[in-house]
Amino acid sequence: MRSWDDLYADREFHWEGAETAVVGIAEEWRERGIRLVHDLGCGAGRNMGFLQGEGFTVIGSDVSPRGLAACAVQLGRAGLPRTLVQADMTSLPFRDGAFDATISINVLNHGSRAVLQAAADEIHRTLRPGGELLLTVLNTWDWRFGSGEEPEPNSWMLADGPEAGILHHFFDEPDLREWLRAFEILRLERERGLQKRSTAPGNRPVHRDQWQVLARK
């Protein structure tokens, strides 16, 4: 089975440019006094760097040493702090209530449903009361849904593309709400991404489809 450390060996996965949702929330959070943010699954640091440039204090965590190394390089080039922690999302090395907010962009669909529930519980634990969570996760309209083998409902070991061999869980709305039952969901939006190629195997249409969620502890 491939890992994210394998994928970060390829510079294709050193994405640049902050996620639109992260750019959109920055002013709102600043006005509400949010200062300390956890970037869960920070990867090469595109969202962490943006938030630090906007005046937030950000701690980045990722399971991948290669991802963290790429993040350190990118932040260093920008002259930004590099507070980085290697950690599994199901066992975060932070105290209860440590953060004002957490972001997790295109991370919390990589794993079984039980693993993702454990990760959501850890995010809840490490947020202060009233702390907020901004995340994006794949939904069941995404073009990769149904690709490969399905070891459990809505979880697919992908058979095609650069993430072949990586387990992905795809959330429908009832599943998403159950997953985040410990949070108050403030906003839930469906986002359909741009096509990157014309067709998938079997001539299926290609589009990235995801949920964008803002929630509060």
Image (cartoon, rainbow, N blue to C red):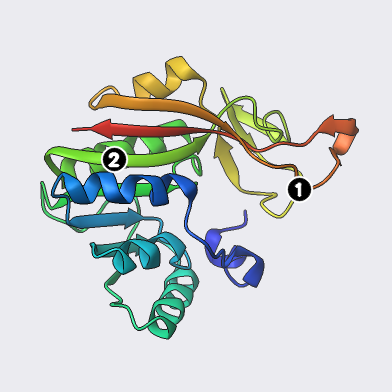
Indicate left or right for 102 with 34 as reference: right
Q: Quadrant of the C terminus?
A: top left
Indicate left or right for 168 with 23 as reference: right
Pointer 1 local density, CA inside 10 Å: few below 14, some 14–19, many at least 20? few
Residue 110: image x %, image y %?
Answer: 51, 44
Q: Is residue 63 above or below residue 20?
A: below
Task: Point out which mark residue 133 bears.
Answer: 2
Q: Amino acid at mark 2?
A: Leu
Task: Point out which mark residue 42 bears.
Answer: none
- Residue at 43% in and 84% down: 77
Of 25 and 6, nearer the camera is 25
Question: Residue extending furthest right?
Answer: 203
Q: Is residue 190 above or below residue 16?
A: above
- Residue at 38% in and 68% down: 49
Residue 41: image x %, image y %?
Answer: 41, 56
Q: Amino acid at mark 1?
A: Lys
Query: Residue 55 is drawn in which quadrant?
Result: bottom left
Indicate left or right for 21 with 147 as reference: left
Residue 28: image x %, image y %?
Answer: 26, 44
- Residue at 65% in and 38% down: 208
Local secondary structure at mark 2: strand
Q: Which residue is mark 1?
A: 196
Indicate left or right for 181 with 130 as reference: right
Q: Is residue 10 in view from this perspective? A: no
Residue 16: image x %, image y %?
Answer: 54, 65
Pointer 2 local density, CA inside 10 Å: few below 14, some 14–19, many at least 20? many
